[in-house]
Image (tube, helix red, strand yellow):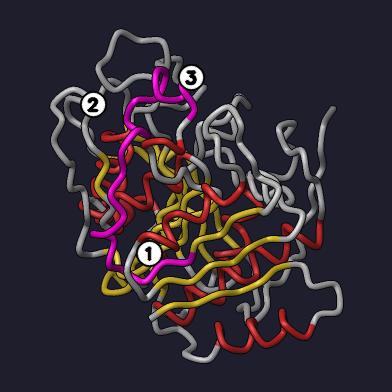
Amino acid sequence: MTRHIVVPTRASGALTGPLVSVAPVAFPSEGRPAELQVRVTAPVTEHALPVVVLSHGHGPSQYASSLYGYASLANYLAASGFAVLQPTHLDSMTLGLRDAPATEAPLYWRSRARDVSLVLDHLDVLTDVLPAVAGRLDVANVAVVGHSMGGHTAGMVLGSRPRDPATGQRVDARDARVRAGVMMAAPGRGGDALSPGAANHYPVLSDTDFSTMLSPTLVIAGDQDHARHLNVVGAEWQTDAYRLAPGPKFLLAVHGGEHSLGGIAGYDVAETTDEDLPRAAMVMRMTAAFLRTQLGVDSGAWAREVDWLRSEPAHTATVSEKC
């Protein structure tokens, strides 16, 4: 069954005017099994644009796991005043590398984090492709957003340290240029929380240290996202990044939300099991507000949206914070 999500055309606190979206943009990627291709989406405005790197998930849909996915979220963030860059990671279904005899297959977890840094290393590529956007990038204000396995990627860039199953060593992929981030429906801790099947198929999820993730982070988790194929503790698993990392951390617990959080992976994504327009719009609205505050666009955006959410009679989500 095809699920259809339509996103409001204007975000809360958004800029007016149209968006520009260009893809694929090739970024330097020497030694990578496939060219690093990126979609760039930004508002047509004269304002400075903080940068958001959006990391896709590892889902089963052919194009959601690529620069062609998450259009609803990318457009919403761009309408909120950001330049959004979406890399296609090596685990994308479009590349056909999940079954390759590579050490990191099928998740390509280390490469994913490296992709985020590569994008930030080579923002000058946009000078020739989108000079109007390139000239307005606020490279001092950068964030990362990721859903599902993209949330794991965001966590690594923000400072979490998984243990490399091959070497037994912690992997530090933190990028100091990234000031803040949002982890949506991201994998939690390993150990006794992980299902035996997941530990065998995705061994990198067996041990993640969140205590080193110091950057301000919004963790978004659905209270019905049980992910029983991955963990044995239920929906709270996706809140581990909030519970186990030091502050400042923020948790948006989405009531009734499953793994797709209402449909944030795209406009038409079959794997959305909890299709719900208000839920998806709320998640995107809160994400944009968090980033606008953390990246210095609007210091009061997050507080206003938290007040709005708490005043809503439907109680679609609960916000928790720790310093």
Q: Where does residue 321 sit, x and y in percent of width and height?
A: 49, 77
Q: Tag 2: residue type?
A: Pro
Residue under numbered circle 3:
197
Residue under numbered circle 1:
143
Q: CA distance from mark 3 to mark 2?
A: 15 Å
Where, by quadrant of the figure, is residue 323 drawn?
bottom left
Q: Tag 3: residue type?
A: Gly
Question: In this orientation, does residue 135 appear?
Answer: no
Element marked by disc 1: strand
**Residue drawn at x 59%, y 30% as measured from the top left:** 63
Q: Where does residue 181 sit, x and y in percent of width and height?
A: 41, 63
N-terminal of the two: label 3 or label 1?
1
**Residue drawn at x 30%, y 68% as measured from the top left:** 215
N-terminal of the two: label 1 or label 2?
1
Q: CA distance from mark 3 to mark 1?
A: 33 Å
Bin the neighbour count of mark 3 within 10 Å (Cα to Cα): few under 14, some 14-19, many 20 and up: few
Looking at the image, residue 155 lies above or below residue 143: above
